[in-house]
Image: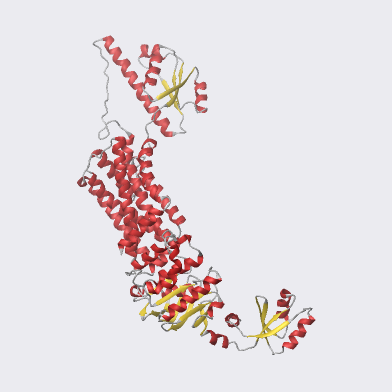
Amino acid sequence: MISCLGISKKYVSVEALKDITFEVPQGEIFGVIGPDGAGKTTLFRILTTLMLADSGTATVNGLDVVKDYREIRNHVGYMPGRFSLYRDLTVEENLNFFAKVFHTTVKENYDLVKDIYVQLEPFRKRRADALSGGMKQKLALSCALIHKPAALFLDEPTTGVDPVSRKEFWGMLQNLKRQGITILVSTPYMDEAALCDRMALIRNGSFLAIDTPEGITAQFSKPLWAVRSNRMSKLLADLRAGDGVESCFAFGDRHHVTLKREEPGRLREYLANQGHQDVEIDRIQPGIEDCFIRLTMP
Amino acid sequence: MLRFLIEKEFKQIIRHPFIPKLIFVFPCMVMLVFPWAATFEIRDVNLSIVDSDRSTYSTRLAQKIVSSGYFRLTDVSSTYPEALQSIENHISDLVLTIGQGFERDLVREGSAKLMIAANSVNGTKSGMGSSYLSAIIRDFADDLRSEQGQMQGAEAVPVIHIAPQYRFNPHLDYKVYMAPALMVILLTLLCGFLPALSIVSEKEAGTIEQMNVTPVSKFRFILAKLIPCWLIGFVALSLSFGLAALIYHLFPAGSLLTIYCFASIFVLVVSGFGLVVSNYSATMQQAMFVMMFFLILFILMSGLFTPVRSMPAWAQTITAINPLRYFIEMMRMVYLKGSALADMGFQMIALAVFAVFFNLWAVFSYKKTN
């Protein structure tokens, strides 16, 4: 389990983390969701004992990240945001090396990495830098797991990985969770957030909300409307200028809109007056991203 | 655990496209090429003679100069301006002007004047060339004097013959002088640069991040970087001992053990220095640049090319904080003079102080950056 109490960290002029408090029970997948530069990596570095917080305390598996940093390193697996295994060693050598560094052998914990490693098996003599992005992530995960850590820290593990591999990767995380491993994972992708047990939305170093994905979306109090017409770019400007509109954001092929008063009929009228045709206005269920945007609205 | 780390380092070194070659090519370059190139011995100085006298004596002098082997007669001009022209056209480096009445003055008055003009664009060549030339002319004057003495019989003119004896390097062979010092440069590059760059490259690749969350301690991690580089350094050093013996028939007058003993302290100094640089550098580029800066400074102020004692006082003070200086001194002392450990207590202590200083600094600064 992981717990954080009032963690703050300031770089020279930027406050990277402001009073972060949360707790992750054993065997949970906890997502830290937020844009680049929100402070995700700083939080991970503090929890993996790579960096000291300015204030606050944190424990991993009951061990203090400052006092017991040596002991913690035996019990956590960390996968940094960018690929950081030895590129000039082969797949097999990397795995063996990290096993030995943790005083264990690949054989001893093979059952834990088996599902992942079987996919790498055909390439085991290949040098790590010659692997594809998805394969690299799998190897990195294997290396982070080989010493059977109690907690796993994955910093943006799916950034730059194709959608199929991403899906596969999250499947693996579900398997690991079943084995009782606590997983802290960060991602800038909102669609992955729904796969976490609980999650925190982070922005500018502060947690905006901590809840289950359902809980987060339930916090979205207003009805949400998806609007489209034949002239999408003009539509965005018109919606934002419309006096009945509270907020409007572009979401792929539709614009997500909340209204001051729930009168979609008036909105349709207004858009028709602005010269839009084929106007569609549908009520939709808000997603994590809608919540995130709403929470960060001034 | 250290074993696995070292095993990993060796795998990485062997797979590196360049470093394994470097380990062999570098000592060969340093021992086969540099001693010939890094020499102050001047040969084939291009000489232009203006002989306005055209007498027996002037011809004899010219022949004596050419037969010395140090000079190549490029042209014999009839006037001085013509000879200057040949300097300007890079044909000759020195002009010897023998004025009209050279022989007559010598015979009648017992003295005559010559002029040497040198092209000082290449300072070493002109300086050494004109001093060689002066020495030959002095020799020529001695010859004449003793001839006269024999002719005049009893009234012998006193002649002083100087026979310099070059101790420890009888033939004043520059290669003998340079080779031991070049071994120092070799060791500096291999044991100073390699570990520093290898640590910075782990920083650059992000692998150090991964290593930092393992139970491997910083000390072990760094030690695992240093040990392979030390081994490589000693292999290269031994290789260059072999090459020096094979090619220059240069065997240390002292004991090889003394050299290895000093080398092991020196290796600690340079690798400690490399670690300090690597601690303050985020990228290879930064590390390379800083290392190059200090290396050039260290080499120029080490007495490798120019003797420390002939530097101005302030520069001599600076050389006191140059570890290369002490090791080069020691190498030459052991190789040429056969000094033993007991003769070099000062150098030994100086190097030990550097070793402690740099390594403490390295440990201290490593903690601060984390």
Observer-nearest of B101 and A183: A183
**Where residue A80 appears, x then y in whole percent?**
45, 69
Report if residue A51 is visible in the image.
no
Color encoding of the figure: secondary structure
**Where residue A208 appears, x then y in whole percent?**
53, 82
**Where residue B87 appears, x then y in whole percent?**
49, 26
Q: Residue at x 31, y 52 (%)?
A: B231
Eyeballing the image, is B283 above or below A222? above
Q: Residue at x 35, y 58 (%)?
A: B225
Report if residue B217 is visible in the image.
yes
Is residue B179 found left or right of B85 in the rendered image?
A: left
**Where residue B297 appears, x then y in whole percent?**
40, 48
Q: Quadrant of residue A108?
A: bottom left
Observer-nearest of A82 and B108: A82
- The number of callouts visible is 0
Q: Residue at x 72, y 84 (%)?
A: A243
Q: Residue at x 38, y 75 (%)?
A: A149
